[in-house]
Structure formats: C-alpha cells, structure tokens
Amino acid sequence: MPLSIVHTFVLVIFTLASFAKSDITSKEYAIKADSKNDVIDLCRHTGCTFIRQVTSVYFLVKCPAAKLRSKTGTNREMATMQHIAKKYNITKIEFQDKHKNYPRTQDSHWTSMWNLNNDVQPSMKVQEAWSKGRSGSGVVVAVVDDGVQLNHPDLRQNINPANSYDYYNSDQNPTPTSANDSHGTMVAGLVAAEANNDQCIVGIAHNCTILGVKILGDEGVTDSTEASALNHKLNGVDIYTNSWGPSDGFGHIGPGSVTESALYDGVTKGRNKKGVIYVWAAGNGGLRDNCNADGYVNSIFTIPITSVGVDGRAAYYAEVCAPVFAATYSGNKNKTLTSTSLASSCVDGLQGTSFSAPQAAGMIALAIETNPELTWRDVQHLIVETSKRHDLQDDFYHWQRNGAGFYVSQVLGFGLMDADALVERAKTWVKVPEQKLCSTSEFRVYSSTNYFSSSVRSRKLIQNGDACQISSLEHVEVLVSFSYTRRRGNVVLTLESPAGTKSFLLTPRPIDSIKFSGPGSRAWYYSSVHFWGEKIDGLWALTAKSDSPFTTEVTLKSWKLRFYGFNKESNKNDCAHKKSGIVTVLSVCITILSLVFYY
C-alpha cells in the first residue's frame, strides 16, 4: 500500500476515533467527481455513506462528524475532508448547509378570471389558443414549491401522485401538513386546474400532467436537495415552474454550485437533450429592488416572468429586471387573482410574480403540445418574438426599440405574453442554430466617483471575428467588480450596446444600503436580454454611478463581457480560440460555467 494512502488511513482513524469521544452526528457533503466509483471508493475508506447521485457530476454522501463547538472546529473538519478527497480523484467537496427560500406572493369562478376571460384588454389570448385545440395534453409540469394538495377536486385528475415527491421531508407525499403552505396549490391551479368540472377555476394548460415537488419550508434546504428537486424525474418533465427565491430587497444571492450543475443538466440532458424549461418568478421587491441580484433569475437557463396589473401598468411589486423575458397578468391593489388552495378550497386575493410564472408555464405547455421538438432556447426565442408591448407602462423608464427591432422595457421585458401567437409560431418554428458563447478579456478600470462626478464610464470597442461569429445576440452577461465606501444599495450599473440600447443592470436598493451600510466590494455576473437579436460589433459602454454621491463613492475596478447567441448565416465553426481581442470560449456546445458568488 502506498505510504500516502497509509497516512490517509491514519488520519481517518484518528479523526473517527476523536468523533467517538464526543457527540456523534452526521454531516452531508456534495462531492464533485468524474466517476461515481471514485466517490464510492472514498466512502469505503472513510466510513462515509453514499446517498445518491445528484447531477451528472455531483454526488451526495453522509459522513460521521463531531458536534462542533467552534468555528475553528468547522474549518479543521473541512480541511480534513479536503485532504482526504485529494487521494480519491475528488475535484471538489462542499459541506451542505441549509438556506431558506421564500414564496413569491404577497370554473365556478370563471367570471372572476379576468386574466383569462377577456374582461380586460389587452388580452393574453388564452381562449384563442384553446379554440385551436390546445390544452397542454401530453405535457408534464413540475410545480416546485411548498407542496401541492394531491387530492384537490379541481386538480386531482391532472396530478400524478406516484411521481410527485417531498424533498423537504424526504417522503413520497408533497401534500402540505400546515395550513400556511398553500402557495404551491395556488400555483398548480393556475397551470392545470381542470376545465368544465364546476370547481373553482380552469388552468391555462388544463389537460397537462402536474407533479408536486415540495422544497420550501421554515428550516430551509441544502444546495444538493435544491438541485435534486430541479432535476426531479428529469427524463419525464417538460417544464419546472418556480415561484420562490431569496429574500427581496437585499443581498446578491444565487444558486450553489450543485444547483448550477442541476440547471445545466436540465437544459442539456432533459427532454431527450432538447432541454427542460425552467420558469421563474422574477421577484416582488418593486422598483426599490433589482432582480439581477438574484442568481436564479439572472441565469441564462431560466425564464424569469414578471407581473402586469389589471390597469395595464407593471404591478407595484414588479422589480427592475434586465433578465426578465415577459409579463403575465397578476393581482394588484385594485383586482386580484383566484385559484385553488388547501382544504379543497378556492380563494381569491392572489397577487405577486408567484402567480405570473405559472401562467407563463401554462402557455409554454400549449406551445410544447403544439411542437414537442421545441428546445429550451426555441422557447426563449418564441417568447421574445410573440410577446407584445401594447400600451403597458412600467413607471421606471421608457420603452426602447433595440437594434434588432424588439421593443423592450426595463421592468416588463418584451411585454405581455400572447398564448395564441405562441401556439401559431410554434407550429412552423424552425430550430435555432447551436448556441455560441464569446467572452472578452477583463477590462481594468479602477476609477472612482466623487462629489463632482457621480458616475464612471468605461467604453470598449468589440469586434466579431473568425473565432467568434455571433450575428444575433441572446443573453449578455457582465462580470462587474466594484467597491463602495458605504451603503451598497446606492450603486447603479448600466450597460449600453453599440446600437444605443441601454440596460439597467443594478438600480438603487434602499434595504441593501441598510444591510450593507459599511464599505465593501462585490464581484457578480449581471445579465440582460435587452440586446436580443443585436450584433456584437461596436462600442460597448459600462457606467457605474452613485445614486447619492455625497454618501457613497463607487470604484469601478474591472468588467468583462460574455455574449451568447448564434450565427444566422453559418453554424459550421467548431470551438476555436482567437489569438487577440475577443475570445471564443465555446462554439457549438455549452460548457458548465463555475461561478463564484461573493456575498
């Protein structure tokens, strides 16, 4: 036996012997490895228990651990695990701590369903889609939330109990046991409540199949549990609708590395490699918040959806949101929504982006029923091309017409979703070419605002080349590194494209200023869909501004761009690297990107 392995065994025996002298508990770790056998080998030699494979590259194990009495003990234990992991071809090991997410919510009732029955204009044209025979038949939607009442009389015919699951309590039944956990049942009704049964409401995709997936609870969940829920029955689910996320108003919080891996697996392996659709509620922080600080919402793998009220204005809780694709109707102070709830009831008073996202999921189900070959990116393109501006107002900034001719709002994305147009376009939709990703080098700035100048502007000329042939943009991500003297919520970031399209990546967040009142720094990937269809070539400008120059000084340290899109003319180039200027990171395939979030 090699000496290094002997030393490892000694270390393990010593560690476990130490545990035996104190209170024993078990701790869960997410293990990243190329091979399941390497993880099993690690477990066999360390006393750990292999639990399950979570994603294509992450595995969950449980190891004996002492009840730690100090922060120092935690660090020492983790260092021990990291040392052991190196001996078994393990690339990464992460302790699984719990974090908490929050619901996004502040037929007999058909007359109350103003969002669908054409009582208000503009219409989302769901009835028109129904008249063409669309009802979501054959499409499977997972409601990832705080549980779903499986035997609700307006849902039970469309729910598949055998394939539902409670990840929060690790059992087969996601039906809530607390009256407070009604959120998921409300969400499910808007997607799939049965039609013409004299019960409550009708869902947009009233013939689809629903899986209840419970993940929310008072004590929170680990990264690996969250990842498992987002890959639940991956080979049998088309759409995951998510009406939850981090707290509104403060922080820069995103998915952990295991959940990132799960999202990647979803869009690359799900639906026979066409990719599952992750619909996400954009958040309820209002104009005093910005959804770009939410790493679930600003992921290129998700479709964030926000809310419009009955008055045709962005709902009072809708956030400034450069990543948001579109809006659907939801409640406001004047008129609210109705849906199914616990105890087989039917309730009104619903408002929040929580209840916009499932309506979008229902419309997407109609499109997938129409054309099951749609990929995850096809669906994004369809939403961009069929959503309508109408006369909607967002109370933050004027509508812009971007360089590709799309009207876009800083709050409402490309406008109100249109189910009829979505279905019609899906009938003849031609699959978009493979996605390319081009990344620039880092642009170093190190320039600060002051009393006399409240903003810093950095401009860079970007040119397409042989190694990066994107002729039509999709998502644009910006890695921005900045520092601030105090009150981080006063920092404003905007990105302007060569076509003159302006995107607000970060806007004033008063609660964030309270929570982060002292000096600090931040490095974060912000994203935008406002440049959809535009070209890369030309001058790109990033502006960092202090909303209160006498209070907060902002230093823009550096920034870099990542462009996602495709080449309209050709899809022949393989992955290649340019020698200078812009670099092609990826051509005809997407590679999982390991992001580091600094809280």
Image (spheres, rainbow, N blue to C red):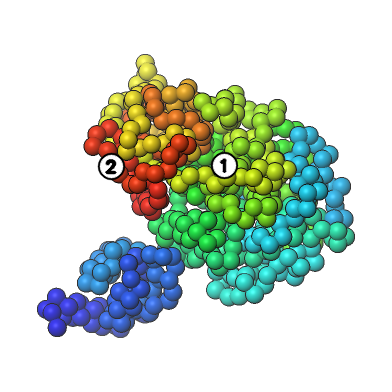
Q: Nearer the viewer, residue 194 or 79?
A: 194
Q: Is residue 398 above or below residue 479?
A: above
Which sits in the foreground, 477 or 183?
Answer: 477
Residue 212: percent from left, percent from top: 64, 65
* Amino acid type, residue under disc 1 in the picture: His
Identify which residue is drawn at 43% across, 65% down: 55
Q: Within 10 angstroms of label 1, few (less than 14), some, or many (20 or more) residues?
A: some
Q: Nearer the viewer, residue 498 or 313?
A: 498
Lower sequence index among marks 2 and 1: 1
The quadrant in which the N terminus is found is bottom left
Give the alpha-carbon distance from disc 2 to disc 1, as whole Å. 27 Å
Secondary-structure class at tag 2: loop
Classify residue 211 by image quadrant.
bottom right
* Residue 109, image x, y percentages: 85, 52
Q: Which mark is residue 222?
A: none
Q: Residue furthest top?
A: 452
Seen from the viewer's position, the closer of residues 436 and 410 is 436
Check disc 2 and give the amino acid type: His
Instruction: Name the residue carrying label 2.
Output: 577
Residue 344 at x, y percent in the picture: 79, 65
Q: Is residue 383 visible?
A: yes
Look at the numbered discs 2 and 1 and tell me whether their residues touch, using CB distance below 8 Å.
Answer: no
Pointer 1 residue? 381
In percent of the image, x 60 and y 70: which residue is there?
A: 165
Q: Is residue 68 left or right of residue 352?
A: left
User: Which residue is painted at 67% across and 47% down in the image?
Assistant: 427
- Residue 592 in percent (x, y) is at 38, 53
The residue tagged with tag 1: helix, strand or loop? helix
